[in-house]
Image (tube, grey):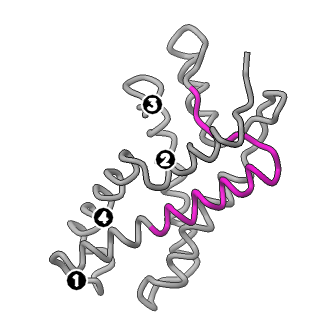
Amino acid sequence: GYVFPTHKERFNRYVKSTVGPFRLAWTGASAGLAQWRDSPEEWEQGMKGYGKRYASSFGQNAIQQTVVYGLDEAIGLDTGFGKSKREGFGARLKDALIQNVTSRTKSGKRVVSVPRFVGVYTGAIVARETWYPDRYSYKDGLRSGTTNLLTGFGINLVREFVFSW
């Protein structure tokens, strides 16, 4: 059955999802893609531009993870990913996908993940409204948040069927 994680386990997961090896590599890849797309173009190319894109991606994720962790703690939810214990591709697929938009209560019941939605959109909107060039607005943050949320479905599938981190 389901066991609600301890405060220490949840804090360690928060640290890992903010500054762990996979997160730092993902941030580097994300910055590289933005560099290749020259987005935002005001940040130019070269190492200086890449550094801005890396710092931006890192900052956006740090805000997102902090909001998710804080709300999880305040509300008493578990937003962490866990591999499915069920058999069969369909059941595992469903479990992996549903975890991107739900959290567990202390009893193990799945509920809509308010922390995840608030975190993903807060990180994206704060980035667009603060350190991005002036032409960006909260609308761009909403688009980016939605992209990040959709990317989470793919990440969960990789974690379920390919390898865990």
Front tag of 3 and 2: 2
> Magenta segment range?
59-82
In this rendering, position of residue 25 left or right of residue 16 = left
Dot 3: element = helix
Front tag of 1 and 2: 2
Question: Does the residue at mark 3 contact the one at mark 2 (Cβ under 8 Å)?
Answer: no
Splitting the image into 4 quarters, where does residue 53 fall? Answer: bottom left
What separation in Å lies between label 3 and label 4 (alpha carbons)? 22 Å
The residue that label 1 is drawn on is 44
Which is nearer the N-term, disc 1 or disc 2?
A: 2
Location of the N terminus by quadrant is top right
Q: Nearest the camera: 13 or 38?
A: 13
What separation in Å lies between label 1 and label 4 (alpha carbons)? 13 Å
Amino acid under disc 1: Glu
The residue that label 4 is drawn on is 31
User: Residue 159: which numbered mark, if any?
Assistant: 3
Question: Which residue of the protein is positioned furthest toward the bottom in this rendering?
Answer: 134
**Residue drawn where x is 28% and y is 83% of the image:** 43
